[in-house]
Image (spheres, rainbow, N blue to C red):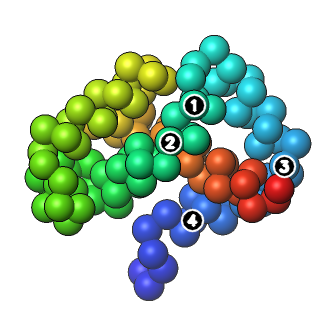
Amino acid sequence: MNKEKGDVLSNIISGLPLSRIEYIKDEYFANTKLKELLKNEEIVKTIDDFLKNDLNVLKTSKQTFMHRNTLLYRIGKVKKMVGLDIRHFDDALTMKIILELDKIEKKSI
């Protein structure tokens, strides 16, 4: 496979109409602080880095030059804000989809 990780997911999500993307975000995440989280560029970058490093705390902290405890604090903050523990695959996948939906929504504005 020559394509980068996430290409398949990005292609699937980018094929959705903007109205469907907005519906998904509103329907499933209306009662969370998701919008607040997505506005925090530092947290979003941390999540993205963590996902790109295969949910590996040590690898992410080394690659980003971030102390392990700082990374764990930010991961904990995500869980506290939106109820997703991105150290676990299902929650990480949900967060990846949310980030992809948000990127598409921001591009269309």
Amino acid type indicated by mark 4:
Val
Lower position in the chain sequence, tag 1 or tag 4: 4
- State the SS at label 2: loop
Label 3 near label 1: C-beta < 8 Å?
Answer: no
Position of 81 relative to 14 (above/below): above
| Spatial separation of the CA atoms under disc 1 and disc 4 | 27 Å
Label 2 near label 4: C-beta < 8 Å?
Answer: no
Q: Is residue 81 left or right of residue 102?
A: left
Residue extending furthest toward the bottom: 2
| Spatial separation of the CA atoms under disc 4 and disc 2 | 26 Å
Lower position in the chain sequence, tag 4 or tag 2: 4
Q: Position of residue 101 (x, y in %)?
A: 66, 48
| Spatial separation of the CA atoms under disc 1 and disc 3 | 20 Å
Position of 47 relative to 9 (above/below): above
| Spatial separation of the CA atoms under disc 1 and disc 2 | 7 Å
Instruction: Report the residue marked by disc 2.
Output: 40
Lower position in the chain sequence, tag 1 or tag 3: 3
Amino acid type indicated by mark 2:
Asn
Q: Nearer the viewer, mark 4 or mark 3?
A: 3
Instruction: Report the residue marked by disc 1.
Output: 36
Q: Nearer the viewer, mark 1 or mark 3?
A: 1
